Image (cartoon, rainbow, N blue to C red):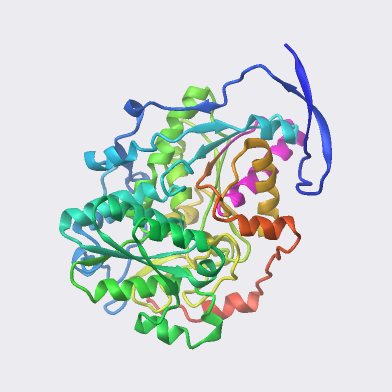
Amino acid sequence: MTATSVPIIEGPTLGAGHLMEVEMDDTVQQHKYQLTEDQMPTAWYNIVPDLPSPPPPPLHPGRMDPVGPDDLAPLFPMDLIMQEVSQDRYIDIPGGVLDVYRQWRPSPLFRARRLEQALDTPARIYYKYEGVSPAGSHKTNTSVPQAYYNKKEGTTKLTTETGAGQWGTALSFACALYDLECEVWQVGASYDSKPYRRLMIEAFGGTVHRSPSDITAIGRELAKDPNNWSGSLGIAISEAVEVAASNENVRYALGSVLNHVLLHQTIIGEEALLQMEMAGDTPTLIVGCTGGGSNFAGLSFPFLREKMAGKINPRILAVEPASCPSLTKGVYAYDFGDTAGMTPLMKMHTLGHDFIPDPIHAGGLRYHGMAPLISHIYELGLMEAESVPQSECFAAAIQFARTEGIVPAPEPTHALAKAVEAALKAKETGEETVILTALCGHGHFDLAAYDSYLNGAMVDEQVSDERFAAALATLPQVNA
């Protein structure tokens, strides 16, 4: 055995130029755990039947009673509506969807040995890497089945919103597979700062509009207020819903938040369970970033099932941006999923549908509400939540890139920041710590954000309590 001395970035002082010498073992050590195609799960996991109590139902905004399938039919195909309200613990993945999944699934699980060495920590850090998909993120796990079910029902066009652009990319890719038109409203701040995301959507055949746009009545009205110019996911959703609801054979596709979207993402956690068994390890901390919640749910729900069954006992932590902290600063109440109030009312942790988040680089996390199912699980005390400022996230991202060789998308850097924090704590306490996170996408089209951080131009926006209160004051009134 020989050892080589190499310089690496030290601990939490990322980007500061501090170097240290560490001894690295140059023998081959397994750090990638890859399932075969035959081992890929063939069913999605629905957590609802396993919860101690059912989540509150969505309400019709006019009648104030639970919505039924007919209320959702103008927006979604019946197969997805049935998944939204399903009480089945497992739902089979159609063979046609599995065939497409096999292009990139099963996705790899890595042990971050070089990051562990850089932190000089006894903690073991694993990450499930979803950036291997054609769109470069986890979003294809749901865009493919959504396009599949829409094509099956006769839909000819899908409309949608996108924050950072990953969802728009994923849906345009899926629509191309099933010969569907795809029209995307991209949040204004993201449209301006991430032009290559727009170009990738267009390369897959999608049409992209900056939101708020002059294409829709809602967009034209909201654009009159200068405060709305940077856009938000809530505004973009309103625009996409308006077009879908007013055109025959056009349906709407959502990239997060709803039950069926979270359901499709659970293939991440089901694979990770098998891969952690391959590694001979059990996580003590499962940490994921949260905006709408699909990536976090996809990783954590299968592990939460095992935790509720008494087989494992990890801490499950959701991490959100400090400038858009729906779980840690929002209230648990019925609210609209969009800014204009066109969607059903959902019981969720919300900052108010009028809240316009600061234009942080993690555009996919700039949503005023958290998935109702995750909000319910949070209320049940089955998970925790914390928020972090973006500069802390990018500090962790730089260290991850320089040790693991992957430049992360801004969204999963929130989870990486807390993973680094937990690993450093394990160094102090000596407590056995096994960390599992989902690296939900790569940051190849987000390099302007890295430029901002590396050149000292990144700003951590401070959102006042008064600003949160102003948005929460407009919550719809719903009787208990």
Q: Which residues are magenta?
A: 411-436
Instruction: Determine if the magenta segment contains residue 425.
Output: yes
Instruction: Determine if the magenta segment contains residue 237.
Output: no
Judged by its main secondary structure, the magenta piece is helix
Nearer to the camera, 31 or 104:
104
166 left or right, relative to 121:
left
Q: Residue at x 70, y 54 (%)?
A: 392
Nearer to the camera, 6 or 437:
6
Residue 323 quadrant: bottom right
Residue 88 quadrant: top left
Q: Is residue 217 visible?
A: yes
Image location of residue 30, percent across then percent down: 57, 22
Q: Residue at x 39, y 53 (%)?
A: 170
Q: The N terminus appears in which quarter of the rendering?
A: top right
Q: Is residue 141 above or below residue 478?
A: above
Q: Residue at x 52, y 77 (%)?
A: 472
Q: Residue at x 53, y 29 (%)?
A: 282
Image location of residue 230, percent across then percent down: 54, 75
